[in-house]
Image: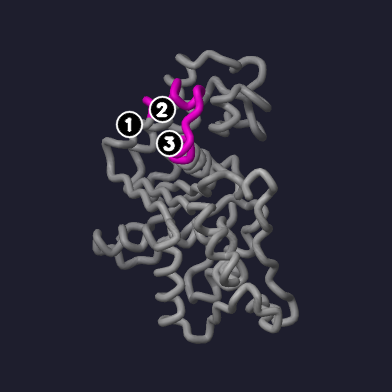
Amino acid sequence: MGIYTGYFDESSDEEQPYFVMGGIVLDAEDAADFDKDWRDAIKELPLLEGEPFLHTADFVSGNEQYKPVWKGRFDEKLLILSAVARVICRYSLQVITSAVNMKDYRALDSVLKVSEAVGHPYTVAARIAYQQMLRWANRNSILSPIKMVLESRSGIGDVIEMFAINGEPTPDPEPKGLPQLQAADYIAWMRLKRYEPTASYERVKASWKEINRILYTDQPFTLAHLGATLVRLAEQHPEISFPMREDDRTLITFNSNFKKPRRPFKRPSPRLR
């Protein structure tokens, strides 16, 4: 019986039109080989804690640690991104992405206390990805539990808390330098830019053709999906309430600390109103 792990990362912020998470499912026996082949594919890139490191958004734009050496040079960037995509294809049993439509999320959250009861967009995207991973396991008759790994970043505590409330195995946080999370970051960035393409994305998007050759699951989450999820959660978990936003009497707290209220999702910035 195999031991499987799903590695997921996001490549967006909550002020963009979509909040996108991407990930891969790997057999634990392939972890060492994946690490080696991944580092070989990006060996020309700058180091992070002694190892070559790919952060796709900065690499493609030529910013941060990739500036000025990788500014421009799109033909070479395409070669490297195609190489990492082939590594993903070689080892990943499933490629998964989930995208939360932020306009729809804000619309629903302005009426119901969705962000307190279900979670902020990062938490919602993580739960969508987790459910897709479970569906993949069911289709393939995989009975062993599948661990989910997320980047150790701001908001991970809320994700862990919400998974625990719903009786789901809580994700393990790992540093972004983990090769598998770098792969997840590439997947998330490529799908994010599909929604709002940029000139730099157009120069490297051909690398995604490698991914299209293997199993690929994409789940955009719209207002209709969010509404259906709330209905399903209400049916499965009658103890969870979804109060109206105008209801000042209802306070939703952390399951592990009933005196600590959950914070609502921040309101849109002026440019998004």
The percent position of residue 112, horizontal first and vertical second, equals 57, 71
In which quadrant of the rendered image does the N terminus lie?
bottom left
Percent position (x, y) of residue 85?
39, 32
Q: Are marks 1 and 3 in contact (CB under 8 Å)?
A: no
Q: Which residue is mark 3?
A: 194
Q: Where's residue 80, x and y in %?
A: 46, 23
Classify residue 259 by image quadrant. bottom right
Residue 9 visible, this angle: no
| Residue extent of the magenta highlight | 191-207
User: In this figure, which residue is indicated by the disc labeled 1?
Assistant: 210
For marks 1 and 2, the one nearer the N-term is 2
Residue 198 position (above or below residue 127): above
Could you classify mark 1 by the number of other residues whose Cα lies within 10 Å: few (under 14), some (14-19), or many (20 or more)? some
Q: Type of residue at label 3?
A: Arg
Can residue 201 be seen here? The reply is yes
| Residue that lies at the very extreme toward the right in this rendered image | 259
With 182 as the anchor, is 249 left or right in this view?
right
Which is the main secondary structure of the residues drawn in magenta?
Answer: helix
Q: How is the image coloured?
A: one colour
